[in-house]
Image (tube, grey):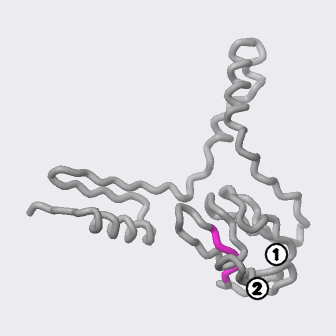
Amino acid sequence: MAMKLDHEDLNRLIEKISASDIQEFSLEGEDFKLEIKRNLFEQNQLSNNLISKTSFDRQPVAQKSFNDNVSIVNEPEAPQVAPPGRSDLTDITSPMVGTFYRAAAPGEEPFVEVGSNIKVGQTICILEAMKLMNEIESEFNAEIVEILVENGTPVEFGQVLMRIKQS
């Protein structure tokens, strides 16, 4: 059976896949091949790939090119590192790379403020990744003590978003 896909069919298919949890999808026809792969949760591998500078100390030429590479790589603003937390607080970290939003839409009330009491399953923020809005829910009954990320800013996988005091 031959399969015909027009642009509308293709767009609908891609939308369905985007809205699902499917990480990889491939479809082959007589005259086309469609492959979709998503790596939403892959950590930035950059830190693992940098070679320690000390190994180059005896090779000035390699040292120079290594430094050039690093300066190119580091042009984007370094992710903000959260100040060390109090031991009685729990960090809520980002499960993905994305853009952090405190409210459902511009002009709406933020999901939580410092001092808010939250319950398990309550939405505390949204992370947008690849045009998908991912509601992040609390895993704890707690009080919000610190919000460490500005609304609308990009976040890294594992970056501390908020600190809570569990109740």
Residue at image mark 1: 164
Towards the viewer: 90 or 5: 5
Where residue 21 sits in the image (x, y, percent)? 45, 68
Q: Residue drawn 73% across and 59% down? A: 159
SS at mark 1 in the image: strand
Q: Left or right: 140 with respect to 114? A: left
Specify the segment rendered in magenta. Answer: 123-127
Q: Is residue 82 magenta?
A: no
Which quadrant of the figure has residue 135?
Answer: bottom right
Q: Residue drawn 58% across and 72% down? A: 134
Estimate the spatial distance between the alpha carbons at disc 1 and disc 2, rounded to whole Å.
9 Å
Q: Left or right: 161 with respect to 4? A: right
Confirm whether residue 138 shows in the render. Answer: no
Of the 4 image quadrants, the one containing the C terminus is: bottom right
Confirm whether residue 19 shows in the render. Answer: yes
Residue type indicated by callout 2: Ile
Badge 2: few (under 14), some or many (20 or more) residues near its Cα, within 10 Å? many
Which quadrant of the figure has residue 123?
Answer: bottom right
Q: Residue drawn 79% across and 69% down? A: 162
Where residue 107 sits in the image (x, y, percent)? 72, 80
**Would you say the residues marked 1 and 2 are in contact, meaning their CB atoms lie under 8 Å apart?**
yes
Q: Main SS of the magenta segment?
A: strand
Of labels 1 and 2, earlier in sequence is: 2
Where residue 71 sits in the image (x, y, percent)? 73, 31
Residue 65 higher or lower than 160, as above or below: above
Q: Left or right: 146 with respect to 59? A: right
Which quadrant of the figure has residue 104?
Answer: bottom right
Residue 118's label in the rendered image is: 2
Badge 1: few (under 14), some or many (20 or more) residues near its Cα, within 10 Å? many
